[in-house]
Amino acid sequence: MIIAKNKFRETVDSLMGFITDKVRRVGDNDRLFLKDVCESYKIYCASVGFKGFENKKDLKKALENRNYSVGNSKIDNNKVCIFKAKLIDE
């Protein structure tokens, strides 16, 4: 039970760190492909020593729980996108 709690905390902390460092909420016409966010998130987790989420579905759910709008974009051939957000480079 303690191991599961620690893994959960680590995953949540890694997502909060990633959002703080790499994601910004922006205008209505901006969007990110979930696939690109997943790749960037994995790189971020590796750089800070966290394992992170194991699949896109869990990452998508966690972003939705943090009030990010995630869904299929008709403009982008129904690819899964995070709306009103962009990745930043530091």
Image: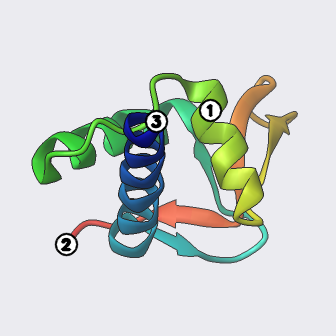
Q: Residue furthest right?
A: 74
Height in image: 46 above or below 56? below
* Residue 20 in the figure: left or right of residue 35: left
Mark nearer the N terminus (2 vs 1): 1
Identify which amino acid the numbered label 1 is placed on: Asp
Quadrant in the picture for the C terminus: bottom left
Please state the horizontal and vertical placement of residue 75, each as a whole percent of the image.
Answer: 81, 37
Identify which amino acid the numbered label 3 is placed on: Ala
Q: Quadrant of residue 14?
A: bottom left
Q: Residue tagged by mark 1? A: 58
**Residue at horizontal 78 percent and vertical 70 percent from the top:** 28
Please state the horizontal and vertical placement of residue 25, each as a whole percent of the image.
Answer: 61, 75
Tell me the crowding category of disc 2: few under 14, some 14 to 19, or many 20 or more residues within 10 angstroms, Cα based: few
Secondary structure under badge 2? loop
Mark nearer the N terminus (2 vs 3): 3
Tell me the crowding category of disc 3: few under 14, some 14 to 19, or many 20 or more residues within 10 angstroms, Cα based: few
Q: Residue tagged by mark 2? A: 90
Q: Which mark is residue 4?
A: 3
* Residue 69 in the figure: left or right of residue 24: right
In space, the residues marked 2 and 1 are separated at their CA atoms by: 26 Å
Identify which amino acid the numbered label 2 is placed on: Glu
Height in image: 71 above or below 20? above
